Amino acid sequence: MTTSNAATAPARQWRIFPELSGTAIAGVAIAIFLLAFLILPVLKVTYVAFQDPHTGALTLQNFGDFFRSSLFRSSFVNSFYVSAMSVVVATVIALPLAYITTRFNFGGSALIQSIGVIPLIMPPFVGAIAMQLLFGRNGTVNLLLSQYLGFKIPFMEGLNGVIFVQSLHYFPFILINLSASLRNIDKAMEESAQNLGCTGLRLFRRIVFPLAMPGYIAGAALVFIKVFDDLGTPLLLNVNNMLAPQAYLRISSVGISDPMGYVISFILVAFSVFSLWASFLFMRGKDYATVQKGGGGLARRDLSRGEKIVAYGVVVFILLLVLSPHFGLTLLAFGTIWSFSPLPDGYTLANFATVFEQSLQYVVNTLIYAGLAAGFDIILGTAIAYIVLRTGIKGRKMLDYMATAALAVPGVVLGIGYLRLFHSFEVPVIGKPLASWWVIIVIALTVRRLPYALRACMAALQQVSLSLEEAAENLGASKGRSIRRIVVPLMAGGILAGFVTSFATAAVELSATIMLVSTSDDAPLSYGIYLYMQSPSGRGAGAALGILAVVIVGLGTYLSNRIIEKDRARKAEVRASH
């Protein structure tokens, strides 16, 4: 009897934890991965920021040293100023486009909205030098202004240049979110205000814009965070007195033991989290609900002839402005010499020949890194989505929070965390530290882009009925087989869209990769662009590489949208047939 109990004891122990098979094991593995490559690096950066470099004891001395330095104080103020002013300028650009295309019967509204999103296709650091050649002190615009009107405008002087470039790049975040909010406003509220005598600018200021505030705040918070954390644009514009460039310069020049790099990194993370919290706090306790289902949208009206001329003039001017980085980059890529003249002296294909002869390794590395990262992202995203939405495992929501938290961690901070945490962790077979192996770049890209793939997989799985799984299991299929044969094929559109989105955005990541590139043979496309843009003689080839980057991201964005639309159409046909 005793022997029998002893023999069955292990089986009983395993039955106490039935979740440890299948999805729970996957959940634990994912949690360990996120803990090792997201949470621990950030905690390490935070810990070192509060650590005395000599004794190892916890202290606030590092922060005292930070605020006693005039350079660091000005960098802190400059980063905040640039982020806030970028939100203001981006609002000035986005608000007319959003209002005109949603408020009036305006020909070409869909085209205008589509063109307005194009700036997101080009990473801001790619177009920074092109913007200098167009709007700099001796750029195209100022040369023409000086020649014909006798004055120049300091578009690109110091912090102005960073604000200008970042605003033109990130304003689509406000445009997309604000347009969506304007379309969801209940037109009955607008009509009620008009019946009470509220019209024109007062109607917009007191009724329309306040009701669209959720979308505007969401877009503005994204702009603020992206600008505050950006590294590549200030570096390429030679503006180093900002926080992200200072963090990079301290670690790359002084070394990974320098506490100031970690203090700056902690401040970057803290401000990213603070911005998200502040946007949530601003909206809390306010009611923006509409009476009608779907809101009904603003009451569109026709424009008079004079109003049409003004509206089209404003829209064309804004679109020419926001597309100027693409024009400038194209001219630079095909130009021979472009200096102190409105346009290049001549045009050539030599820059592209240089890229394919000397720098093809950058492209190959990028395809490998971004492809692997996107592949890992959809695997992780699909698994997390299934665990969160289809199981009752304890702590499943924490997986979602951990994966999404990568949005609040700047790339430069993640790179610094990897350098500090893994610089002495030697990979057994390779014989070099993990922080110096190209695989760490793939891991960084995977972590940075996981939230994009996760959201796509979540949306795809939410559209798959649970009854289909249950039907398969009732017919004898195991849980794993029903996932492989039923769930994943039905999620294919969302999974593929998540892959393409992750791939396209990972292909131009600079903030994390610039910290982790150990040799030029391991460098990706974004790093190659950064190197070329450091000298006037290399800018043509750098622009050619930039064109390749834009093509990769643009093609990825197009494919992602096509996949999503086809998937929606297919599901609509299936629903209609039933």
Image: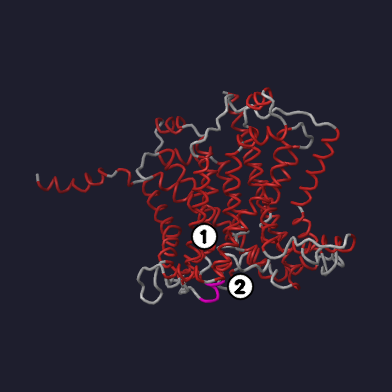
Q: Which residue is mark 2?
A: 520
What amino acid is labelled 1 in the image? Leu
Q: Residue at x 69, y 45 (%)?
A: 94
Membership of 256 in magenta stretch: no
Q: Quadrant of residue 471?
A: top left
Indicate the position of residue 385 as horizontal and vertical percent values.
Answer: 47, 43
Q: Residues within 10 Å of mark 2 (few under 14, many from 20)?
A: few
- From this viewpoint, is residue 104 visible? yes
Q: Residue at x 59, y 32 (%)?
A: 571
Indicate the position of residue 376 as horizontal and vertical percent values.
Answer: 51, 54
Q: Is residue 356 left or right of residue 467?
A: right
Determine whether the residue tagged by mark 2 lies in a helix, strand or loop: helix
Q: Which residues are magenta?
A: 249-254
Eyeballing the image, is 543 above or below 578? below
Determine whether the residue tagged by mark 1 lies in a helix, strand or loop: helix
Eyeballing the image, is 246 above or below 213? below
State which quarter of the image contains the N terminus.
top left
What amino acid is labelled 2 in the image? Ser
Front residue of 116/195: it is: 195
Which badge, 2 or 1, is on the more N-terminal residue?
1
- From this viewpoint, is residue 513 visible? no
State which quarter of the image contains the C terminus.
top right
Front residue of 290/201: it is: 201
| Mark number displayed over residue 2 | none
Q: Residue at x 71, y 29 (%)?
A: 199
| Mark number displayed over residue 268 | 1
